[in-house]
Image: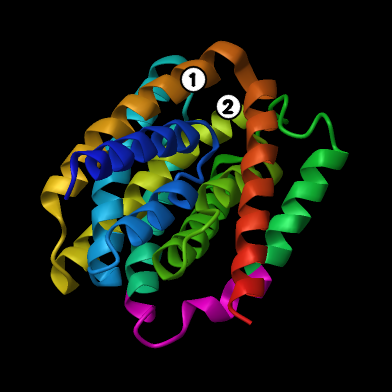
Amino acid sequence: MTDALWLLLGAGAFFAGFVDAVVGGGGLIQIPLLFSSLPQHAPATLFGTNKIASIVGTASAAVQYARRVRIDFRIVLPGAAAALIGAWFGAKSVALLDPTLVRPLVLSLLIAVAIYTYLRPNFGTDAGAPLPLATTRLRIAVIGVTIGFYDGFFGPGTGSFFIFLFIRALHMDFLQASASAKILNFSTNLAAISFFAGTGAILWKVGLLMAACNLAGAVTGSSMALKHGTRFVRRFFLIVVSALIAKMAWDMISTH
């Protein structure tokens, strides 16, 4: 590997960490970068390497948010446990089904999420009335296991789906939803690392370099989100979801 390639991977990981800390979607940057830079390695190896880089940034962002944003761990921790279980079974299902089969459905859902958010300027700018604890726990468990399975199975847009559903179903604002999503995302990353470490060799040197850069990006991104508040996160959310839509649409067109 050349110095230029190390620099490219580090810079990409920094930007991915920044995006992921604000609204999720860092995989949109990091995974294509790894596949284009290291085409000689097996997909399982690159996915595992990506998760090593991502989990450090996700953990850092979660800590940053937890210091400044009220996170109800009575709700979030059961959701994280459900997400971990869902992600593990999702990763195992990759061997049984072709993940690209779900691409048209995911693209349609992302378009619906973008339109809904755009047409409702106040969506997620303020937290709604709190729900009963039992109801919230049940809903976050369902969200956790469902989106966790999706993350282990396919992945693009996981953070965006978590945030949207937390606002819509759990009455959080964008900042609370983003903070809570980091904890569930940490669980899904942990499950994926456990799976990929057992099925493919992880590129530890690459993963650790990208982890350090992803961490720096996550610290920067979470600081900006906390400084500028829910409206900044909402705008960034729409940008990232639009980029996800464009990327997935292009992938579908180019493979036909």
Q: Is residue 124 visible?
A: yes
Q: Earlier in the sequence, mark 1 or mark 2?
A: 1
Would you place residue 197 above or below residue 212 in this image? Answer: below
Q: To which quarter of the image does residue 143 belong?
A: bottom right
Residue at the image position 30 percent from the left and 53 percent from the top: 50
Say which element carries label 1: loop
Q: Main secondary structure of the magenta part?
A: helix
**Front-lying residue, 152 or 75:** 152
Q: To which quarter of the image does residue 105 belong?
A: bottom right
Would you place residue 250 above or below residue 253 in this image? Answer: above
Q: Which mark is residue 256?
A: none
**Front-lying residue, 124 or 225:** 225
Would you place residue 80 above or below residue 46 in this image? Answer: above
Q: Is residue 131 visible?
A: no
- Left or right: where does residue 112 sit relative to residue 246? right
Residue 216: give x, y in percent of width and height: 32, 25
Q: Is the C terminus in the top left, top right, bottom left or bottom right quadrant? A: bottom right
Query: Residue 151 colored magenta?
Result: no
Residue 56: give x, y in percent of width and height: 27, 38
Marks 1 and 2 in Cβ contact (< 8 Å): yes
Query: Residue 104 colored magenta?
Result: yes
Residue 96: give x, y in percent of width and height: 38, 88
Residue at the image position 53 percent from the left and 34 percent from the top: 178
Instruction: Give the extent of the magenta segment.
Output: 92-105
Q: What residue occupies the far top of the structure in this picture?
A: 227
**Front-lying residue, 162 or 77:** 162
The residue where tag 2 is placed is 175
Amino acid tagged 2? Leu
Q: Which mark is residue 69?
A: 1
Q: What residue occupies the far bottom of the structure in this picture?
A: 96
- Dot 2, crowdedness within 10 Å: few (<14), some or many (≥20)? many
Residue at the image position 87 percent from the left and 41 percent from the top: 119
